[in-house]
Image (cartoon, coloured by chain):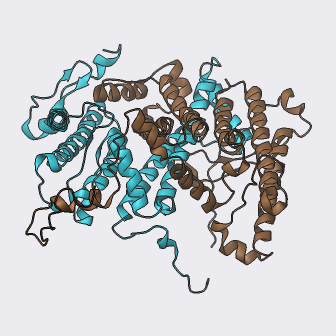
Chain colours: A brown, B cyan
């Protein structure tokens, strides 16, 4: 006999209220029907997925992203003589390189693919910024998210556009490809005298590791007190309850300092944004203002100068080594004869 | 004291109170909670800082940005080294590890006092694991304390740089790549969460409307809103993932893999 298992009634999907702002957009539709992934609730995450807003800016952004991806695929196929299997096999090593100089590339293979691809993707992220702005206006947020996205664009634009312009050649920018950008990062550091001694790189790493640390601290604190509602942050900022009290007291008692439900998000936001802003500064100075960060560090007393890289410095000076342990005394050279 | 603090400041519920019935260290100094583990942690940190000050005085370089307390020389292996040839480093690492572990246990006691989850000490334990793997576990596996991390502002940068080149190219270490991905992802998700809260707090008299606004925004923008609790779950696990990858990244270098470029020259039978 078949048993019918009664499914629990789920609450209706949450949908935004109709807005004249939305209907003014000729492409203003929400794509797809919302559906649920019940497993997500086991992890404390929201189960409703979709719908996603298209909008003119979103359509343009997706269009140019896909167009850039198409150029990448075409360039990759061209590199592998049209063999799709080789593209798959050597995917990590595919490299779409920029042209020399600042002009148009002489051919598709010599940087043309790179220029077209990068132009499309640059337009895509800028249209995405417009989409971000337009949605922020629709929901009347303060524009923090837009500033964060523009900061991220600033970093990529510094790497791919501003610094190559300042250096006078697109070839200063990374090639497109998986290993290509790892190699660029490695070579960039070696070429300009070790980026570890670049103080803006230091600051960027500080903010980057700090971001992870802050996520660890904030995420752990909220999960530890979520039973008392500390995760309802908009409500807690208005009116604090025991969950937020405990979150604050935990850090006050542990390290003598605490944020509150509002100010912790100032810390989070500016650490994350600080990462990309100081990275952009560190990149634009490298090769343009500072040619060698190690020499810069030594000059400014930051870095201990390495000893001279001579055979004597590495193996120990042979003429002063004690006689008797596997070594015979070298014949004494009378003064005034030979040598300096 | 915060306005609501006196309600929460209560004695009891500590390790010493459990085993002795009374805890003589169960008190606060200003804002700080002390406790048994606070005393151990501060004591160990004080000894460590004493060794650092003594070492800097003996090195004689007053520039605190440049001065470096290096790991022992290779000839001392896993044994004790003379003070100025790495013995100071060994002492500092020992005291630091004790201080960190005691600090984590102190966090456990504070969690017990406040009757909250142990998520923060668990997270801090993962952070300690990164230190312990770097300074103790990997040198033990490599058979020499000289494999440890040099202590110093630019000194540790030099160590990181040299270690990267020693294994050919650290960028090709897959755990390094996954770790870097974790660091970048945490920064991105952090910016998104910070923006959501800073962008919407106190914009409506009803906080439920603000929250619904956040959910609707993310559904419009990227097709999914993870929710108020979910975003903290995501941040928590992203941070743990990043720390685990960092552990694996340095633990495998030099112990099982000598050259990360060569590492990729494996052959898959049906593929090649």
B247, B57: nearer the viewer: B57
Residue drawn at x 43%, y 49% as measured from the top left: B240
Look at the image and tell me whether residue B193 can be seen.
Answer: no
Please identify the quarter of the rendering in which residue A112 is found.
bottom right
A226, B121: nearer the viewer: B121
| Residue B235 in picture, x, y percent from top left | 50, 43
Residue drawn at x 75%, y 30% as measured from the top left: A133
- What is the count of numbered marks? 0
Residue drawn at x 59%, y 22% as measured from the top left: B201
In the image, is B22 to the left or to the right of A237? left
Q: Give above or below for A95 relative to A158.
A: below
Q: Give above or below for B147 relative to B49.
A: below
| Residue A303 in picture, x, y percent from top left | 37, 39
Please identify the quarter of the rendering in which residue A314 is found.
bottom left
Q: In which quarter of the image is the C terminus of chain B?
A: bottom right
Residue at the extreme bottom of the image, as rendered: B269
In the image, is A77 to the left or to the right of A276? right
Residue drawn at x 47%, y 31% as measured from the top left: A229
A166, A269: nearer the viewer: A166
| Residue A263 in picture, x, y percent from top left | 49, 23
Residue at the extreme front of the image, as rendered: A336
A222, B162: nearer the viewer: B162
Look at the image and tell me whether residue A60 can be seen.
Answer: yes
| Residue B92 in picture, x, y percent from top left | 19, 43
């Amino acid at each position: 006999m078949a048993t019918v298992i009664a499914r629990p009634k789920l609450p209706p999907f949450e949908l935004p209220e109709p807005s004249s702002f939305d209907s003014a957009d000729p492409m203003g539709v929400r794509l797809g029907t919302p559906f649920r992934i019940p497993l997500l609730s086991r992890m404390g995450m929201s189960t409703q997925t979709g719908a996603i807003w298209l909008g003119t800016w979103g359509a343009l952004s997706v269009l140019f992203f896909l167009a850039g991806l198409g150029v990448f695929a075409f360039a990759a196929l061209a590199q592998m003589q049209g063999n799709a299997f080789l593209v798959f096999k050597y995917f990590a090593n595919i490299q779409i390189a920029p042209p020399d100089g600042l002009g148009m590339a002489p051919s598709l293979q010599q940087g043309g693919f790179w220029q077209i691809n990068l132009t499309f993707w640059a337009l895509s992220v800028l249209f995405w910024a417009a989409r971000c702005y337009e949605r922020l206006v629709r929901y009347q947020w303060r524009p923090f998210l837009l500033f964060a996205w523009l900061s991220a664009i600033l970093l990529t634009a510094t790497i791919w556009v501003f610094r190559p312009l300042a250096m006078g050649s697109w070839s200063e920018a990374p090639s497109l490809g998986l290993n290509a950008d790892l190699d660029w990062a490695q070579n960039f550091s070696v070429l300009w005298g070790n980026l570890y001694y670049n103080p803006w790189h230091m600051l960027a790493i500080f903010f980057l590791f700090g971001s992870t640390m802050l996520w660890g601290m904030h995420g752990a604190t909220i999960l530890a007190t979520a039973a008392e509602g500390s995760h309802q942050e908009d409500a807690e900022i208005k009116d604090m309850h025991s969950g937020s009290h405990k979150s604050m007291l935990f850090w006050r008692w542990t390290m003598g300092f605490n944020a509150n439900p509002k100010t912790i998000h100032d810390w989070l936001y500016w650490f994350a944004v600080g990462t990309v802003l100081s990275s952009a500064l560190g990149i634009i100075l490298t090769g343009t203002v500072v040619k060698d960060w190690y020499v810069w560090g030594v000059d400014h007393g930051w870095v201990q100068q390495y000893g001279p890289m001579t055979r004597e410095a590495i193996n120990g000076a042979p003429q002063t080594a004690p006689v008797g342990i596997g070594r015979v005394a070298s014949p004494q050279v009378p003064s005034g004869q030979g040598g300096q | 004291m915060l306005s609501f603090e006196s309600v929460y400041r209560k004695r009891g519920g500590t390790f010493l109170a459990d085993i002795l019935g009374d805890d003589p260290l169960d008190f606060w100094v200003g804002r700080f909670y002390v406790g048994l583990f606070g005393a151990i942690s501060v004591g160990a940190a004080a000894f460590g800082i004493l060794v650092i000050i003594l070492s800097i005085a003996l090195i004689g370089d007053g520039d605190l940005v440049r001065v470096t307390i290096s790991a022992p020389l290779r000839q001392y292996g896993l044994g004790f080294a003379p003070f100025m040839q790495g013995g100071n480093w060994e002492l500092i690492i020992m005291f630091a590890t004790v201080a960190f572990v005691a600090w984590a246990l102190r966090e456990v006691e504070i969690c017990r006092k406040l009757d909250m989850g142990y998520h923060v000490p668990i997270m801090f334990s993962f952070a300690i694991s990164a230190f312990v793997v770097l300074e103790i576990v990997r040198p033990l596996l490599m058979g020499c304390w000289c494999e440890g991390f040099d202590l110093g502002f630019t000194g540790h940068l030099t160590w990181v740089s040299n270690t990267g080149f020693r294994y050919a190219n650290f960028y090709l270490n897959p755990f390094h790549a996954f770790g870097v991905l974790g660091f970048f992802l945490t920064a991105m998700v952090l910016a998104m969460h910070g923006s959501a809260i800073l962008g919407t707090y106190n914009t409506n008299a009803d906080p439920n409307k603000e929250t619904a606004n956040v959910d609707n925004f993310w559904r419009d923008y990227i097709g999914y809103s993870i929710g108020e609790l979910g975003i903290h779950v995501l941040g928590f696990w992203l941070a743990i993932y990043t720390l685990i990858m960092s552990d694996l990244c340095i633990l495998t270098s030099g112990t099982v893999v000598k050259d990360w470029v060569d590492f990729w020259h494996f052959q898959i039978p049906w593929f090649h």
